[in-house]
Amino acid sequence: MPKLSIIGAGNLGAAIAQEIAARGLVKELVLIDLLKDLAVGQAADIQQALPYRHKTKVYAADYPAIKDSDIIIITAGKPRTAEMKNRLVLAETNIKIVGSIIQEIKKYYPYAIIITITNPMDIINHFIHQQGFPREKVIGSGGQLDSSRFRIALGFPEQEVEAYVLGEHGEDQVPIFSRVMIKGRKSSFSTEEKVNIKERIRQTALTVIQKKGATVFAPAAATADMVEAIIKDQKRLLMCSVNLKGEYGLTDVSLGVPVILGRKGLEKIEQWSLEPEELQQLQEAGRKLQEFKTTLSRAEKTNSSTRSAGTAG
């Protein structure tokens, strides 16, 4: 039976753990956090919800316990705060955190499929791939959540809507209006309608953040869908951030695209035929992430030089 480890046992990590345990997807579920008491408490709380449902073993542990994990989910990291003047500061902070986690993964079990949650997710997902992990085993969670919000924003019962969001899990997301199906029929949208719907997608997330501080249950469900597709080898179509090597005219960047998930992780990248405007927006999102990556690299080099100068003599 499968084993899964979650690194980061805060609200989101615990919600993901609860969703996975409630679905009975794995036999063994490990929670790891610097705040060990938090991880112990979360694990015990989840375990106590299971006796009438599944036989999943949920427990807190240290990094050696990740050995033999089929999947490792990384949620650990700092949220963006008022003190962080821009996304660059968040990326610098969380790359350091995830970098230390990756060293532990390499030490104890570098063979698992890694699902990235930590923000800025696309940047972090590419960073993990650059540390020597194959792209088939490094998959970012975000596109499914954005697609869910798109379906809600369209204003119909979600079960009657087929709609997808590609691109960045952030400001440069790309709703694919050309593939929207409502009640089995293709829909068309005016420019004004597209603008209004994009704003509704944005407000869907902002409302949750403004009212309770962070989104938790929706990203947990989306991530559990990814886990289920992998564990059950469903060969299921999902929107995920993966590292591109020429697909959609993009390379050396991780971006949300339609993928097939199965037992091997990323089984296939679907290359949809998009409207020229949509493809342009997707490529622009990729270009911006590449520019951000370059800026981040320069900032890290500058900070490294400053630290070296400060310790000289």
Image: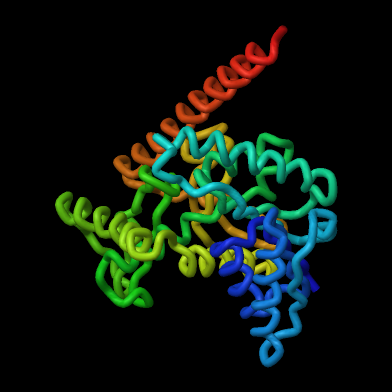
Q: Which residue is drawn at 80% across and 51% down?
A: 111
Residue drawn 80% across the image and 54% down it: 63
Asked whether the viewer can see residue 267, the reply is: no
- The C terminus, quarter of image: top right
Judge by depth and name the residue closer to the eye, 289 or 245.
Answer: 289
- Quarter residue 182 falls in: bottom left
User: Total number of numbered labels?
Assistant: 0
- In this view, 69 is above or below 49: above
Relative image position of residue 222 (x, y in whole percent) = 51, 65
Residue drawn 39% across and 43% down? Answer: 82
Q: Where is residue 142 in the image (x, y as percent from the top left)?
A: 49, 55
* Residue nearest the viewer, comparing 217 with 41: 41
Q: In this view, does 35 lie above or below 103?
A: below
Residue 214, image x and y in percent?
43, 60
* Image quadrant containing the N terminus: bottom right
Where 306 falls versus 185 (above or below)? above
Q: Give the residue at x 34% y 66%.
A: 151
